[in-house]
Image (cartoon, grey):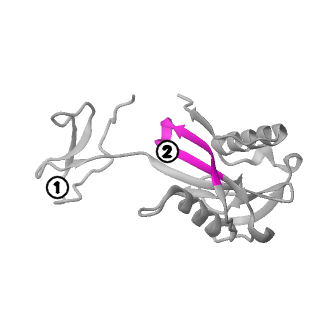
Amino acid sequence: MSKINKPIQKFCIVCGSPTELKIPEDDNRQRAVCTVCGHIHYQNPKVVSGCILEWENKILLCKRATEPRSGYWTLPAGFLENNETVSEGALRETSEEANATSDDIKLFFMCDLRHISQIYMMYLGKLSKGEYSAGPESEDVKLFSESEIPWNEIAFSVIEKTLKLYFQDKKKGNFSIHFDTIDPR
């Protein structure tokens, strides 16, 4: 496990005083700790959730209009918000990025990205009524068959891995739940 070299939380969210890196009592790693009130600032991984939506033997992809990787293709996905389930987050992101919905999604792939402290949870479902359009975070939204996927223009390695697992399972005629870790360190 890597250690934090400098506090990302520079000032205390409780009293506004500076923080310093130290290992709090009964802990085992460095944390940003307030120099005045002693509040410990924990930093935890971010959860990203999204969907693979199928329609007439094709899947829905979005061309990103925002950084990072603007202009590259991805599945509709984004960071989970407070007070929503992971599947609710996946459906919300799909609605925001592709104006698309699904009535029934199931977990398909969970992937740990240790090097950027993210957890991806991707769901599989059917695109409702074949309806979609670009939302404000997407330049374009299209349905692709496997042979049409712009593989050299996929935004993130975890999305490429998700797509490859999807097409492998589709060829077998049976979709499984997959788990993996991407850690290029």
Find numbered disc 2 in the image and state the secondary structure of the residue it sits on. Answer: strand
Which image quadrant for residue 12? bottom left
Amino acid at circle 1: Ser
Q: Which residue is mark 1?
A: 17
How many numbered badges does the structure rendering display?
2
Residue 184 is one of the magenta-drawn residues:
no
Amino acid at circle 2: Gln
Residue 121 is one of the magenta-drawn residues:
yes
- x and y, in percent, of residue 53 in the image: 73, 58
Q: Residue furthest right?
A: 147
144 w.r.t. 166: above or below: below
Q: Which mark identifies residue 2?
A: none
Magenta span covers which residues?
106-123
83 w.r.t. 161: above or below: below
Q: Is residue 116 left or right of residue 21?
A: right
Residue 147 is at least partly visible in this image:
yes
- x and y, in percent, of residue 107 in the image: 61, 49
Q: Which residue is mark 2?
A: 118
144 w.r.t. 185: above or below: below
Q: Is residue 116 left or right of residue 14?
A: right
In front: 176, or 122? 176
**Cβ–Cβ under 8 Å for marks 2 and 1:** no
